């Protein structure tokens, strides 16, 4: 209602639309009150039809930063998921308004973007899916998409690549970062699978350059299963360097505690209580490592799988490198079928547009050609 008690015409029409579309009375009531708050806030400074993405970002911040009092008389702040629900209502209202050609600008196309959801996540289903979602600026981290599927921020990628870490952690991050192997595959690696000095007849391996062998049948000690495809992966010389640092650290740390280095595993515990030293690393320690790295690079990595997605996306899209053909990426990742690799073409629409823009227009005519 405005100051004179007149109902907001568009807001009212939108609520009628929701009702006609079969939304429950509860939904209509809660959407209505949330959008009413938004429209009242807008009315103080501007016309809601002319809102920009920045206005909506500001509204989200206002919701986050404004204390609300609960029935017990205490005041608290809205949770991130509550703020997310409020934004959903505003989005729904603007979608309706856009459909009725009520908006001046291109707000709707700026509010949302196509986003890829990985297989196995709540929204991704079995094979992953692409859906239209609120842009990052309007989303809250813990709501909806959760942590990002890949490190889409070049600065964060650089910080992770340069982060100073204990030798084992540095090697593990380098390996995940540059080979894209699954964390289960990394934790199932044995020292004997690492041919960083090249293969030899004794090793029955013909590859000359530094490489490792991902195996699926190693008798692991940590209960980790390397589900995937046995394959050979070449490694960058930087990874070899960080391995050498780790090997020295491993030997020194275990010797200092009088512990024999008997584990066949490539990755063992080094920064823990003495009784766990030298035993095969587990998933949970990698997860904790990712949390530590996230804090220090100021980017929520989520899990180690994000590094695999990041490498795949970089190779496919040619970020920080030349684009690599999909079938080669498929081999590197150990995908059984190419369709699994194809999902890494995140933000295809934007990439296609960029590719088109990057192409030179028709070559300028030479004077003599005229
Ligand atoms: Zn080999």
Image (cartoon, rainbow, N blue to C red):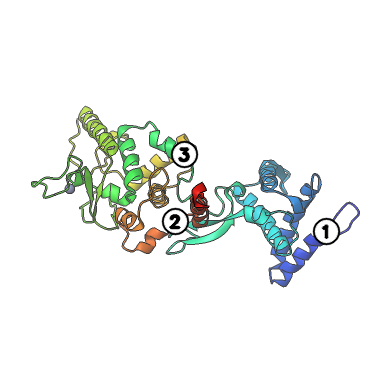
Q: Residues within 10 Å of mark 1 (few under 14, many from 20)?
A: few
Horizontally, is 259 left or right of 120 in the view? Answer: left
Horizontally, is 257 left or right of 6 in the view? Answer: left
Cα separation, mark 3 vs mark 2, equals: 20 Å
Residue ID for mark 3: 156
> Could you tell me which residue is drawn at 83 percent across and 58 percent down?
8
Cα separation, mark 1 vs mark 2, equals: 43 Å
Q: Which-is-in-front pick, marks 3 and 1?
A: 3
Residue ID for mark 2: 345
> Could you tell me which residue is drawn at 79 percent across and 47 percent down?
46
For residue 140, above or below residue 11? above
Asked if the residue under mark 2 is in contact with the one under mark 1, i.e. CB atoms within 8 Å, the reply is no
In-front residue for pair 119/233: 233
Q: Quadrant of the N terminus?
A: bottom right
In-front residue for pair 34/333: 333
Q: Residue furthest right?
A: 4
For residue 290, above or below residue 249? below
Q: Which-is-in-front pick, marks 1 and 2?
A: 2
For residue 101, above or below residue 356? below
Please tell me whether mark 3 sits on a helix, a strand or a loop: helix
């Amino acid at each position: 209602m405005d100051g004179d008690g007149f109902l907001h015409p568009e807001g009212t029409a939108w609520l009628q639309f929701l009702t006609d579309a079969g939304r429950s009375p509860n939904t209509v009531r809660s959407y209505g009150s949330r959008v009413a708050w938004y429209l009242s806030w807008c009315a103080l400074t501007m016309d809601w039809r002319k809102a920009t993405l920045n206005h909506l970002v500001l509204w989200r911040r206002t919701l986050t930063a404004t204390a609300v009092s609960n029935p017990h008389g205490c005041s608290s702040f809205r949770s991130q998921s509550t703020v997310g629900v409020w934004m959903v209502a505003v989005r729904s209202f603007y979608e309706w308004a856009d459909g009725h050609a009520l908006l001046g600008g291109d707000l709707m196309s700026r509010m949302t973007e196509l986003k890829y959801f990985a297989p196995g996540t709540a929204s991704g289903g079995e094979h992953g899916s692409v859906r239209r979602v609120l842009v990052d600026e309007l989303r809250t981290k813990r709501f909806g998409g959760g942590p990002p599927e890949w490190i889409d921020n070049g600065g964060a990628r650089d910080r992770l690549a340069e982060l100073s870490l204990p030798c084992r952690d540095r090697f593990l991050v380098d390996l995940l970062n540059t080979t894209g192997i699954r964390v289960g595959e990394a934790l199932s690696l044995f020292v004997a699978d690492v041919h960083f000095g090249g293969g030899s007849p004794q090793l029955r391996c013909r590859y000359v350059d530094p490489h490792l062998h991902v195996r699926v049948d190693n008798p692991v000690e940590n209960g980790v299963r390397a589900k995937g495809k046995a394959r050979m992966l070449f490694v960058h010389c930087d990874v070899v360097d960080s391995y050498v640092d780790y090997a020295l650290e491993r030997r020194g740390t275990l010797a200092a505690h009088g512990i024999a280095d008997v584990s066949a595993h490539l990755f063992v515990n080094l920064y823990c209580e003495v009784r766990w030293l030298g035993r095969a690393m587990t998933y949970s320690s990698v997860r904790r490592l990712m949390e530590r790295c996230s804090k220090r690079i100021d980017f929520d990595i989520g899990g180690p799988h994000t590094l695999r997605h990041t490498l795949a996306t970089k190779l496919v899209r040619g970020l920080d490198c030349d684009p690599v053909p999909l079938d080669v990426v498929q081999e590197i990742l150990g995908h059984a079928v190419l369709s699994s690799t194809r999902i890494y073409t995140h933000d295809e629409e934007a990439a296609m547009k960029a590719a088109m823009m990057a192409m030179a227009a028709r070559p300028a005519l030479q004077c003599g050609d005229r």
